[in-house]
């Protein structure tokens, strides 16, 4: 049994907010957009197809028009590519204004998205190596559970203060800092094991 809904909210401080990058080199031309792409793929794709019970909010904070949020809706996505380059092509289309089934472009920042999710009844956790060690006791009960993560730079001080003021609990996978995509994979493993 899994929660009815799982959401990942990931903020990239550097990922570009315009269709100006090459899908062949999202790391160098997209402001480390590759970090976000990899995380989206591992969150939404499993061997049997798209994880319909998972949503992903990709908050892009780089130039020239931050913030922009791409909301990937698991239950609506037609198919999820295995390749970062193919997903980068989808992101390019969305940033150009094309309509892609299961992907919304929102002019919202991290805090706006979190407030929306709280209103929708999600129990949210901020993943950080200084948090309490995550275990099954945090994961068994919520019907809607979400995890907030940063990119290779982490969240900025203002975002962390805002999360604290909203009483969002900080959890960790241990004292080591991991790649965002590895954190997403580990969280999903724990969720499926615990429920």
Image (tube, helix red, strand yellow):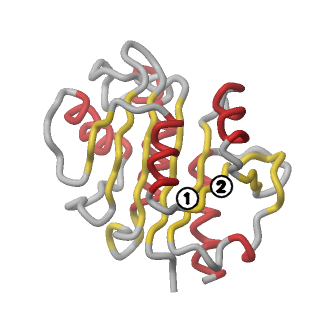
Residue 167 vs residue 40: left or right?
A: right
Count of numbered marks: 2
Local SS, label 2: strand
Residue 95 vs residue 59: left or right?
A: left
Of all residues shown, which one is farthest toward the bottom? 1
- Give the residue at x 31% y 44%: 87
On the image, which quarter does residue 132 sit in?
bottom right
Residue 174 vs residue 163: left or right?
A: right
Residue 126 vertical placement versus 155 (above, below): below
Q: Which residue is mark 2?
A: 125
Residue 105 vertical placement versus 172 (above, below): above
Report x, y in % for residue 66.
42, 20
Of all residues shown, which one is farthest toward the left? 98
CA–CA distance in space, label 2 to label 1: 6 Å
- Give the residue at x 40% y 29%: 26
Q: Residues within 10 Å of mark 1 (few under 14, many from 20)?
A: many
Q: Residues within 10 Å of mark 2 (few under 14, many from 20)?
A: many
Local SS, label 1: strand
- Give the residue at x 52% y 45%: 114
On the image, which quarter does residue 157 sit in?
top right
Q: Which residue is mark 1?
A: 146
Report x, y in % for residue 124.
60, 56
Q: Nearer the viewer, residue 163 or 70?
A: 163
Report x, y in % for residue 131.
81, 51
Which one is earlier in the sequence, the residue at label 2 or at label 1?
2
Report x, y in % for residue 169.
73, 53
- Give the residue at x 62% y 78%: 141
Q: Nearer the viewer, residue 158 or 18?
A: 158
Screen quadrant of the C terminus: bottom right
Q: Nearer the viewer, residue 78 or 119?
A: 119
Mark 2 and mark 1 residues within 8 Å of each other at the beta carbon: yes
Residue 62 vertical placement versus 75 (above, below): above
């Amino acid at each position: 049994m899994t929660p009815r809904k799982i959401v990942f909210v990931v903020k990239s401080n550097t990922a570009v907010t315009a269709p100006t990058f090459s899908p062949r080199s999202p790391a160098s031309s997209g402001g480390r957009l590759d970090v976000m792409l990899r995380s989206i793929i591992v969150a939404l794709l499993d061997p049997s197809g798209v994880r319909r019970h998972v949503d992903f909010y990709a908050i892009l904070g780089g130039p020239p028009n931050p913030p922009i949020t791409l909301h990937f809706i698991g239950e609506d996505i037609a198919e999820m590519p295995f390749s970062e380059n193919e997903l980068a092509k989808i992101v390019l289309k969305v940033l150009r204004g094309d309509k892609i089934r299961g992907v919304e472009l929102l002019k919202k920042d991290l805090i706006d998205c979190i407030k929306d999710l709280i209103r929708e009844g999600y129990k949210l956790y901020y993943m950080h190596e200084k948090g309490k060690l995550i275990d099954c006791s945090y994961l068994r009960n919520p019907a809607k559970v979400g995890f907030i993560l940063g990119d290779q730079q982490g969240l900025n001080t203002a975002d962390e203060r805002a999360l604290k003021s909203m009483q969002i609990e900080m959890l960790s996978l241990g004292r080591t800092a991991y790649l965002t995509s590895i954190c997403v994979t580990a969280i999903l493993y724990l969720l499926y094991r615990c429920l």
